């Protein structure tokens, strides 16, 4: 399985579409989303391995030079992944294909996959957060059309997670090379969630303590516990994870 196979829909066992495919409505919705959000958007037809819509000015790629490109991919961001990291990211993608046999068709039609990884432009490394979700899925769980959005990542390590509309969460485990179900719903206490929500709007520890009417040491202790529970080192990383997994 190569890069082209993983970034296109080359399955010979496609199923029937569960509902009519209205490309014009999809394009209209994606263009509206693009205008309202500070993210790069890519709408991809996996059947034909072609882009149906792409943000005119792609985040980080405006200054890319031909020498920076490591390969040709329909998703332009995959062209700038360092060669030494490619196989690791391809394994993550293989695991997503495996996951489709573990969850219901309804969950598979509504899941969001968030993968943080670096690209290299002009010798500099930039971590991006790639989110994608299926927009058209057939009866055999084959994705026909998918939407990608790209934003700067708050993390500085490769990681991937899957969240479904029904609230199921899966985290990629590099040891088992599989997405494993996790339960974040009860991981943080209500106090820790409130403090993290305040941190999300960039309140300082002192401001949080004053707003919550608690001591500064209590706020710092709560943040330390949150970082430990979410296995991160910085508050903005904790906020990103909590937002992605709908903890806050």
Image (spheres, rainbow, N blue to C red):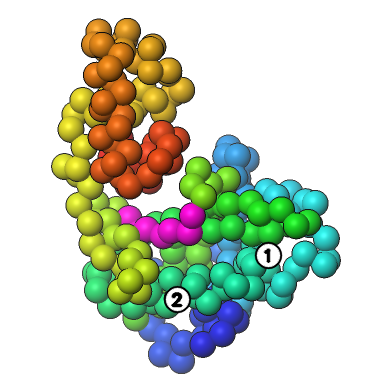
145 to 117, vertically: above or below: below
Residue depicted at x 41% and y 90% = 13
Which residue is located at x 25 percent, y 8 percent?
A: 213
- Asked if one can make out residue 156 in the rendered structure from this viewpoint, the answer is yes
Secondary element under disc 1, as helix, strand or loop, is helix
Coordinates of residue 43 in the picture (x, y in percent): 58, 61
Quadrant of residue 143 within the rendered picture: bottom left
Give the image quarter of residue 214: top left
Q: Magenta region, mostly helix, strand or loop?
A: strand
Residue 111 is a magenta residue: no
Q: Is residue 160 magenta?
A: yes
Q: Position of residue 21 (x, y in %)?
A: 48, 68
**Left or right of 103, for residue 30:** right
What numbered label is drawn on residue 139? none
The quadrant of the image that shows the C terminus is top left
Q: Which residue was labeled with disc 1?
A: 80
In the visual, does 71 lie left or right of 234? right
Measuring 56% from the left and 63% from the top, which residue is drawn there?
23
Task: Tell me the magenta residue range.
Answer: 157-163
- Read off the residue under disc 2: 91
């Amino acid at each position: 399985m190569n890069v082209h196979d993983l970034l296109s829909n080359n399955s010979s066992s496609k199923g029937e579409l569960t509902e009519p495919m209205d490309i014009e409505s999809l394009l209209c919705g994606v263009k509206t989303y693009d205008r309202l959000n500070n993210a790069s958007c890519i709408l991809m037809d996996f059947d034909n391995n072609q882009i149906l819509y792409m943000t005119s000015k792609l985040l980080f790629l405006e200054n890319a030079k031909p020498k920076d490109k490591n390969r040709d991919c329909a998703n332009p961001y995959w062209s700038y992944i360092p060669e030494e990291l490619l196989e690791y990211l391809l394994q993550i993608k293989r695991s997503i294909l495996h996951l489709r046999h573990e969850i219901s068709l309804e969950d598979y039609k509504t899941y969001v996959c968030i993968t943080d990884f670096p690209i290299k432009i002009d010798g500099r490394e930039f971590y991006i957060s790639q989110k994608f979700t299926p927009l058209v899925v057939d009866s055999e769980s084959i994705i026909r059309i998918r939407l990608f959005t790209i934003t700067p990542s708050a993390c500085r390590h490769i990681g991937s997670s899957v969240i479904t509309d029904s609230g199921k969460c899966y985290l990629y485990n590099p040891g088992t090379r599989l997405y494993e179900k996790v339960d974040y719903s009860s991981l943080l206490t209500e106090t820790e969630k409130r403090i993290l929500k305040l941190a999300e709007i960039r309140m300082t520890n002192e401001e949080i303590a004053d707003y919550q009417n608690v001591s500064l040491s209590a706020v710092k202790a709560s943040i330390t516990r949150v970082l430990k529970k979410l296995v991160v080192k910085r508050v903005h990383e904790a906020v990103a994870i909590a937002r992605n997994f709908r903890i806050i």
